[in-house]
Amino acid sequence: MTTFRKFTAGAAVLTLAAALSACSSSSSGGGDDTSGSSSSASGGGTLSVWCWDPNFNIYAMQAAEKIYQQDHPDFSLDITEVSWDDLQTNLTTLAQSNQLDQLPDIFLMQNNAYQKNVVNYPDLFSDYTDSGVDFSQFPDSVVAYSTVDGVNYGLPFDNGTAIQAVRTDILADAGYTVDDFTDITWDQFITLGEDVLAKTGQPMLTGQAGSTDLIMMMLQSAGASLFDDAGNPTITDNDALNAAIDVYTRLVKSGVLVEVNSWDEYINTIVNSNTAGVINGVWISASIQSAPDQSGLWAVTNLPKLDGVAGATNYSANGGSSWAISSNADYALAADFLNSTFAGSTELYDTILPASGALANWIPAGQSAVYAEPQEFYGGQAIYALVVDFATKVPSNNTGVYYYEARDAVGVAITAILNGTDPSAALEEAQQTVEFAMGG
Amino acid sequence: MTRRLRRLPGYLFLGFAALASVFPLYYMAVSATNTSQDVLASRLIPGSNLMANFESLVTQQPLWSSVWHSTVIAVSTTVLAVVITSIAGYGFEVYHTRAKDRLMGFLLLAVMIPFAATMIPLFRLFADLGMVNSPLAVILPAISTPFLILLFRQASRSFPREIIEAARLDGLKELAIFARIYLPTMRPTFAAAAVITFMTAWNNFLWPKVILISNEYQTLPILLSNIRAGYVTDYGMLMLAVLIASLPAMVIFLILQRSFAEGITGAIK
């Protein structure tokens, strides 16, 4: 009884205090008019930014702020940490409720989400036509993600170039080196992988069940995608997709690729030495390096290529992100800031690479000495220069407005195929799912 | 002896069920003391990384301000919601007419509409009121829910009318009857409503995320979401943050546990 009374009394006092502080804070919050556009009147100006990783893109933005401040001492950034999923929710809400004045000046967007957002919510973006950014200094395949009808909507930042990272110690136990896995085809990879598995008991790859990351990388390595140039889904009657699914099925059935249930388990297989290799965007390197006891035991090379598919290469990409300037931005300031840092400062990329592993898409940065430094974790290989070189060789493809829908449908189809469903029937169903999502 | 033996399978089953429900809590607490790599390797014994995890958490994330914002929002929501819905529930039952019953039925229909459907209109409403980024915009939509009104209305049904009549004869005003007779008697119902509202408000993610666009008033669930956002997740730090986020709800539940159980089952002393 007394506990209850004390509790209610305490709660009442707290509420009063809380309501008071909430009120006072809301009035100050309302007064400060959130984001960007009211800024540059003072000359220097503040830009508001939404991005999501304190150790990666937020860190890069802060470094860019310092560099821009050298010539613009009054300049500052107001960075809000918001995860990608939540950022997408915010964008959708603001676009649908037509509250565009709440947008920040600059926001980061996953490359794969660009087509969908620009086509569905064009009001969110300013285009880069008058920004002065020289897009020829970025790899074509990366610029293509954020280009709609020939107009650029994103400045490429985070490099999603795909790498094959292998454990040299496990390969050595099976009598191989990283060179045996360089410039090969998937058929050769499976043969080698079966031998490594037989001799060491380790799979060459792991992957999240139902995830289509590897399939999508195989497709892009041949310049293919799940859509034709007109944006229609091409899940059935797609040679590259058929070849990729065939390879994937053989990888899983032979045990060369082990499927796990979640992303956390996937990372676990890497950091706890349950796989002899990884194929993913170069950003996976940050997770690989989170196991310090494996320093010196990894090496990086290119991907296997699809056999018998026109245009197949050993290079691909997965993920990556680009900076968008919003329609609510102080455009001149935002464009000048991005152009003089992410599209014009070797110093910036030299600062952020060692500290955060943020690898440039801006080609001139790759020629800097910092990129050519040997990496102890990768047995002295200069992996960053290597990956920047890979990036220039990645074929462009058409992401498609309904990229995520198509990818999910193909993921379902692959699970069905692995469980014995006829591939053509499963892909036909995936095609219909995407056509339904597209309203056709 | 045989009776005990006969009960053994039951006890074994219950023991297993208890273990299964406590294990995630244990795993969360132990993981908060381990390094990220150990958490991924499913280490089940406490480690020595608790302080390091704590240090990364407070240096990388605005922990204390998030705890404060969550507390302000959850406590204000709870107190306001309990006051408003208890009066509403009491009114619907004690002064009920056919029209009010119909209105109650209409309110219950609102429970069927998923939040995702009302989110955009709600956002427009608060944006037009100039309340984007205001904690009040998080609190206001949660202070009156049909479910709580229903809870109080059903509980009021078992409240003896004779007491109300007697109090009226003794000259007590209607509000005084509510505050001095109804409220102390219905303590378990208030406790149940408070626990439910507090937990919902404390764990609320989607709406605060949408309306609190800048991180000025970031709450704990948003902080948890941000920790997982990067390419590399520090699982030790994440588990510590989850542990911290779970503590208040556990404490409140333990304090009000008995009343909560009574309130849910509708008992009156």
Image (cartoon, grey):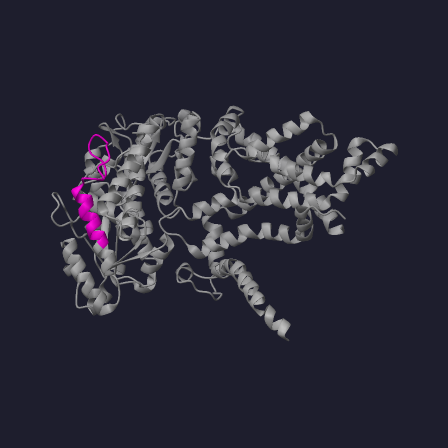
| Residue B217 in view (yes/no) | yes
Q: Is residue A73 above or below residue B252?
A: above
Q: Residue at x 57, y 41 (%)?
A: B201
Query: Within the image, what quadrant is residue B96 found in?
Result: top right
Q: Nearer the viewer, residue A365 or B244?
A: B244
Residue A414: give x, y in percent of width and height: 27, 48
| Residue A375 in view (yes/no) | no
Residue B84: give x, y in percent of width and height: 67, 34
Q: Is residue A96 above or below residue A161?
A: above
Residue pushed farthest right? B170
Query: Within the image, what quadrant is residue A23 found in?
Result: top right
Query: Within the image, what quadrant is residue A312 found in?
Result: top left
Residue A184: give x, y in percent of width and height: 14, 55
Q: Is residue A391 left or right of residue A294?
A: left
Q: Nearer the viewer, residue A52 or B243?
A: B243
Q: Residue at x 26, y 25 (%)?
A: A130
Query: From which residue to which does the magenta span run?
Result: A226-249
Q: Is residue B76 left or right of residue A396?
A: right
Q: Nearer the viewer, residue B53 or A259?
A: A259
Residue A180: give x, y in percent of width and height: 14, 60
The question of residue A232 being in magenta is answered with yes
Q: Classify the position of the C terminus of chain A by image quarter.
A: top left
Q: Is residue A217 left or right of residue B105?
A: left
Q: Nearer the viewer, residue A52 or A186?
A: A186
The question of residue A122 being in magenta is answered with no
